Structures are given as structure tokens and as C-alpha cells.
Image (cartoon, rainbow, N blue to C red):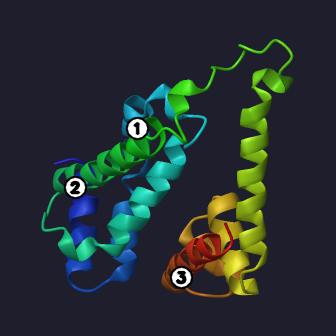
Amino acid sequence: MSTPDRQTERLLAEARGGSASAVGRAIEGCRDYLLLIAGRELDTRLRSKVGSSDLVQETLWEAQQHFAHFHGTTREDLLRWVRRILLRNIANATRRYLETGKRDAARERPYGDDPGAANGAPPDVLVLADEERAQVLGAIDRLPDDYRRVIQARSFDGLSFEEVGARLGRSAEAARRLWVRALDRLRSEMGDHP
């Protein structure tokens, strides 16, 4: 058995014993695998609407939230389980953007169809991206300081939970819990302020 397999099995055993940090580390170890799957499975027409890394982040968050539903014991079991969550998230995004008339990504023109478009992207895509970015940043600005800082460190700076914890003067596990609460609050803010 390879070292990653043994390490994952050890983390899964610790997670079953109640270690939340082991849950986080085991699931975080699936990120690269999920990015490969998302890159292969995500319809190219959706890429202007949703990114592979966004879907993977959502999948990792869901897997942590619902780890109690995971009954496997091996790395292979864990990869299969998170892959199913990711594929469900991709299917949901496909339904949301390709199967509804209002957000029909299939009606969008690919980059370069408008020779006057800045940076090779059609103006409507650039405006939509700017509006979505402004909406997210506005929602983040409304969050309490600790939530803003943990989202900045984890989601924008790409720090590990250990690094986030060191930056915030907390343990890695406390940083992970704070990050999860911050994402929940951010989703709530986004829902309250369309």
C-alpha cells in the first residue's frame, strides 16, 4: 500500500475517533484529484459562469459538513465519495446554467466573436464578471472582521489551515471552524443582498 493510501487511512481512523482536523486534512487531500475531474467533466460552455476551482471548493466544504455520511475506510473509498459529490455539483451547475432560458450559457458567444471586445472577452461577460465580483466583495465587506480575515487568508491567499491559524493566533482546527462559519455567513449575506 502506498504512503498516501496509508496516510489517508490513518486520517480516516482519527476522523472516526472524533478528530475534526483529521476530517479536514483527509478531505483536503482530495483537492488535486477533484480539480482534475472538474477540469475534465465541466462543460466548456459553463466556464464563463462557474470555475472548476469553485466547484471543487464547494465540494470540499460539503464533504466536511457531511462527513458523518461517509462510511468508507480507504483512500479509494474517500475519492469515490467526494467524486460523487463533485459530479452532483457539476450536474446542478449544468442544470442551472445550460437548462434554463434566463441563464442559458449556450446562447453566449465564445471569446473572440466580438472583435472589439476588451481582453478577448465579450463586454457582457466582462460586465457580468465585474458585477458578480463586486457582489461577493460587498458581501465580504459586511462580514465581521474575523470572518473577513479568515476568508482572505484561506480563500484568496490560499493558505493552509495551519497557516491561517498562525496568522489569526488560533489553532488550525479553530481556523477551519471559523472559515466554515464565515462561508455560511457569506452565503447568507449573498442571499440577503441580491
Residue pointed to by mark 1: 99
In-front residue for pair 54/93:
93
Mark 3 packing: few (<14 Cα in 10 Å), some, or many (20+)?
Answer: some
For image coordinates 56% across by 72% down, the residue present is 187
Q: Nearer the viewer, residue 162 or 65?
A: 65
Q: CA distance from mark 1 to mark 2?
A: 26 Å
Q: Residue 12, percent across and down?
A: 23, 69
The percent position of residue 7, horizontal first and vertical second, equals 28, 61
Residue 17 figure quarter: bottom left
Closer to the N terminus: mark 1 or mark 2?
2
Location of residue 123 (image quadrant): top right
- Along the line of sight, the residue nearer the viewer: 94 or 99: 99
Q: Is residue 77 above or below residue 163?
A: above
Mark with earlier residue (2, 3)? 2
Up/down of 184 relative to 58, above or below = below
Measured as percent of width and height from the top left, residue 148 is found at 72, 76
User: Please, what is the three-letter code of the amino acid marked with disc 1?
Assistant: Glu
Contact (CB < 8 A) between labels 1 and 3? no
Q: Identify which residue is drawn at 26% across, 77% down.
A: 15
Question: Which mark's residue is nearer the viewer, 1 or 3?
Answer: 1
* Residue type at the position of mark 3: Arg
The disc at residue 81 is 2
Q: Mark 2, residues whose alpha carbon is within 10 Å: few (<14), some, or many (≥20)? A: some
Type of amino acid at the residue the image marks with label 2: Trp
Residue 8 occupies which quadrant of the picture?
bottom left
Report the residue marked by disc 3. 181
